Image (tube, coloured by chain):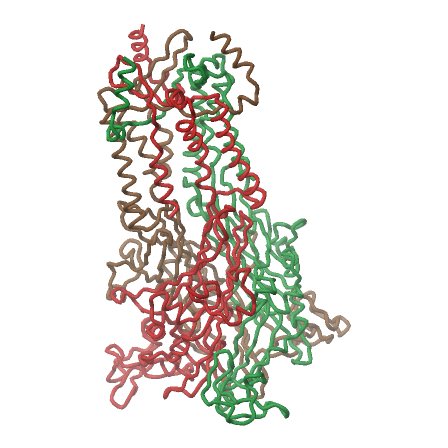
Chain colours: A red, B green, C brown
Amino acid sequence: HGAKMSKAAGCRGFLHHVFDYETAKTLVIPHFGVGIVFRFTQLLVVLYVVGYVCVVQKGYQETDSVISTVTTKVKGFAYTNTSDMDPRMWDVADYVIPPQGDSSFFILTNLVVTPEQTQSHCPELPNPSTVCKDDCDCIEGYNDPRRNGIRTGLCENFSTTVKTCEVFSWCPLEVDTRLPKKALLAAAENFTVLIKNSITYPKFNFHGRNILPHVNSSYLAHCEFNRLTDPDCPIFRLKRIISEAEADFQEMAVKGGILGILIDWSCDLDWWAGKCLPKYSFRRLDSQNQDNDVAPGYNFRFAKFYKRADGVEERTLIKAYGIRFEVIVFGTVRPKQILKSSVPIVADWVMLTCMRKRDLYTKEKVTYLVESPDSEPVSDHCSEARYSEVSCMCCSCS
Amino acid sequence: HGAKMSKAAGCRGFLHHVFDYETAKTLVIPHFGVGIVFRFTQLLVVLYVVGYVCVVQKGYQETDSVISTVTTKVKGFAYTNTSDMDPRMWDVADYVIPPQGDSSFFILTNLVVTPEQTQSHCPELPNPSTVCKDDCDCIEGYNDPRRNGIRTGLCENFSTTVKTCEVFSWCPLEVDTRLPKKALLAAAENFTVLIKNSITYPKFNFHGRNILPHVNSSYLAHCEFNRLTDPDCPIFRLKRIISEAEADFQEMAVKGGILGILIDWSCDLDWWAGKCLPKYSFRRLDSQNQDNDVAPGYNFRFAKFYKRADGVEERTLIKAYGIRFEVIVFGTVRPKQILKSSVPIVADWVMLTCMRKRDLYTKEKVTYLVESPDSEPVSDHCSEARYSEVSCMCCSCS
Amino acid sequence: HGAKMSKAAGCRGFLHHVFDYETAKTLVIPHFGVGIVFRFTQLLVVLYVVGYVCVVQKGYQETDSVISTVTTKVKGFAYTNTSDMDPRMWDVADYVIPPQGDSSFFILTNLVVTPEQTQSHCPELPNPSTVCKDDCDCIEGYNDPRRNGIRTGLCENFSTTVKTCEVFSWCPLEVDTRLPKKALLAAAENFTVLIKNSITYPKFNFHGRNILPHVNSSYLAHCEFNRLTDPDCPIFRLKRIISEAEADFQEMAVKGGILGILIDWSCDLDWWAGKCLPKYSFRRLDSQNQDNDVAPGYNFRFAKFYKRADGVEERTLIKAYGIRFEVIVFGTVRPKQILKSSVPIVADWVMLTCMRKRDLYTKEKVTYLVESPDSEPVSDHCSEARYSEVSCMCCSCS
């Protein structure tokens, strides 16, 4: 009978076979105790999901990304008195660019100023490709994007010893090799910045601020962030945050750089998980690898435009070196990861270990295969813990 | 025989036990009807995934985040005529900062102007720590970052009654306590802003715009967003969006604030899900909690630099109060969540409820354990619906 | 006995039934060979997860989004000599707005200049609603936000033939219909931009830069991005990236537009996956649909403020047309998706196909249901591959 059956099975064509339906075998145990554990665990999860997550947090979503707004306000001033420049006071309107207090702001620490530029003619800076002997070396209209202007075709005295081709450009040309070795606004290390950050997880309708509820105005008027003593103060001294990023302010101030102020709002919104608080970290974002970098540090050029009494437009070109601070807010919420997979694990564990009749349940749930084809399969009295899943879960929690 | 076997099983050492292999038991039902339902459901899903998702949407991904670009264009002008200032017309080049029409823009509504500042000497503003009797009270070079400049060591008349220490700074100093109680540019409530937003879900190759296909130029020339009557118009009157955020324009205009214009592009890209349309919402983002806030509202300082005929640099310092609008675009797509888990549920349901031989299938699929260890386990004729999963799914849809 | 049992089962009430516990039936096979394959596969995954992912990458997370910083530096200059304007050299301080080298920067390519505006009175531009015959047509104080200023109540000569209402505004008024047909800074197509991009996947502690380790300074000094010959060079010629986005520079330069420079850092951080490298793509982001668009292209107004010798504030209003470049960095990592589901599949496949006693294992694992209720269920000797899952996985890889 069995042989005929297996032969029949063997003959069944592929087409027929395709329409077989494969489904998992299940065991139903009508034991009130195990059932109540199973249902109770399930009920807890359902109640939690429906009651807390859906009603209180108004959303049931697996994950959500943060929406954030940041304002920044720098305080401090610097006084400079160098041979290159008149004595000068620098305040926020001078050194914060752009001034709006966005999440990204730049603090000027060093600069090359080229005042009183006008659209006119002047000899180029000396350089193997610009030095000339007479006008024949200078092709009129020649226009190299890596140079400074359009050649007029004349060869002029750059200094008493060197002649270079004359160009039409904003003259006099900038000489950006005269960058001060010590940052002009070295005093900027003592400037402070107040960072206000509000966040929302829209799917969970969760709102947070980095100015925590227990913090009051009088504390904020005088505090300064310190990871150990004042971890909740949103006012940061520039020197401290740069040293937290393992960089040196004075070294960064000369050639400029980019510093990330990272605010991590990742958190678990389950009610037992405690408050959702911001975690600050600081990281230098520009490359410090001198080998494969162009234009190391951070600088840019801008100009202040003036009009002379005779109507001629004049500008002061500023090559600004400094530190760009970027407040980067990130975070995801990902609740109930462990909870969902807990229901069958708990009920199985109770059934297979705690119940008086655990041997019977185990026998029916687990078929223990014996090698001899004659013998009946027997059940094993001990089920392996799903340790691999558990170990993965532990790992994912860290 | 059974006893020997169970004894042998008991003696098996841990090491051996570790290499047991545990696998789910399955039941194969060679019924053409059930099989065809099973395969047909599977085929539909595969065809959908391969045909629509992989070919039409050119991507099969579980989730994707939006990439967005926003341009904004403010229209309107205001006329001011106060005792502090000459009559003046304000247009976009005056009150929109920065002018570029980015996703974040600031509209000036109130300001404290300090014109004709130069680098010079002037007495500090009176204050317990700045009032002096004679020069001995003013230490030369003293430099408090919370004050306004470097002390020259002189004690000068601030007014006829008060003497304060003289500082070197941008003089005259700003007196920012004279902020108008009623916003200077109160008329800004009638300004409008056109928001153009294009988005992409790169993995799905989906593109969208907030100017919908059915909207034409003549409508756009005159429409104004209204949640009820014109929900698709991308032109927003400032007063309206601030009132939608449950704030008051005139109150915000005095001290400034931040308003989020949220555009939610979350959608289901399955073909039956309808069009993927933007949903606008508005939310005040700066804190209104007076208790634990520093510098409530939103303001920043910037300067316009001039050069006098005698070559001296002069600036007009402006402490600008106003409303920063942030267009925040967010969204994720997460298709086919329900679809994937539907195949076995549908086939199981058909098999266990609709088929003529459902009792046989149920008997083989489901072993119903009976308490007495002697009796054979029997099958239950009715399988519980996977209601907990279903309830979770329902919840997740809302 | 069976009948009594089934009757008892039928009578069992709903409440009792609810507390039945349903669990999957499993088969344990104490075969050393299969077990070792099972455990070995599992061990590999656990070792990989614990060793490489948790220790080397310091995080085990399912997915993570990129955190990025971008700096840009434009090079090049343009010379203009048109009838409207004096000959002029344009350098970065003139045409890059804002100048800071952020991820979003604007390059001026065309402009309408309105010099020497002051707060004064002038007749409006002729237009059906502004033309007047005498002062009665002009209501004093009338203030239409779509017009240019506040009416003074006078009707003045705009030209020798047309009279219009006089307004108080920044006068003379801008005539923005005189936009050059050929972009003024057509030469901007040869400007280059250096893009420096550093990224971090914080949960994986992975850092990357678009200047790759094998790229050196001398190469960077002269290279230019080309998808075929120089795909790693981070210096882009504007003309090329616009043509890669299937747009035309000269056409975009006239009315302006927005161009996205997309850097995709999506990658698999599994160690065998090779390096995580940036992929560049370029896409025009502003709409080119003329039918339902307002203000096509991209432009904004800004002003340069001057002070005359007599103290009157004067401004040069510039309506700037140009191309806004947005460097958009995106990416997610999603490792080990396939790995996790591989353990049972590999072990099942080995067990059911490679083992000598595969028939026995198959018989116990898979119950093959026979139609006749009398016959014993038999096992099938061949298990279907989980082809649907596999096909989905393949699809998801593409």
Query: Which residue is painted at 27% across and 85% down in the image?
Result: A163
Query: Which residue is painted at 34% across and 37% down in the image?
Result: C340
Q: Position of residue A147 (x, y in %)?
A: 32, 74
- What quarter of the picture does the C terminus of chain B occupy? top right
B289 vs A7, left or right, is right
C40 w.r.t. C186: above or below = above
> Is residue C314 among the parts visible in the rendering?
yes
- What quarter of the picture does the N terminus of chain B occupy? top left
C367 w.r.t. B135: above or below = above
Query: Which residue is painted at 44% across and 31% down in the image?
Result: A344
Considering every residue shown, the one lying at the far front of the view is A356
Q: Nearer the viewer, residue A234 or A137?
A: A234
Determine the image quadrant of residue C194: bottom left
Q: Position of residue C51 (x, y in %)?
A: 27, 46
Q: Nearer the viewer, residue B93 or B37?
A: B37
Q: Nearer the viewer, residue A362 or C199?
A: A362
The number of numbered discs placed on residues in the rendered structure image is: 0
Q: Nearer the viewer, residue C321 or B385?
A: B385
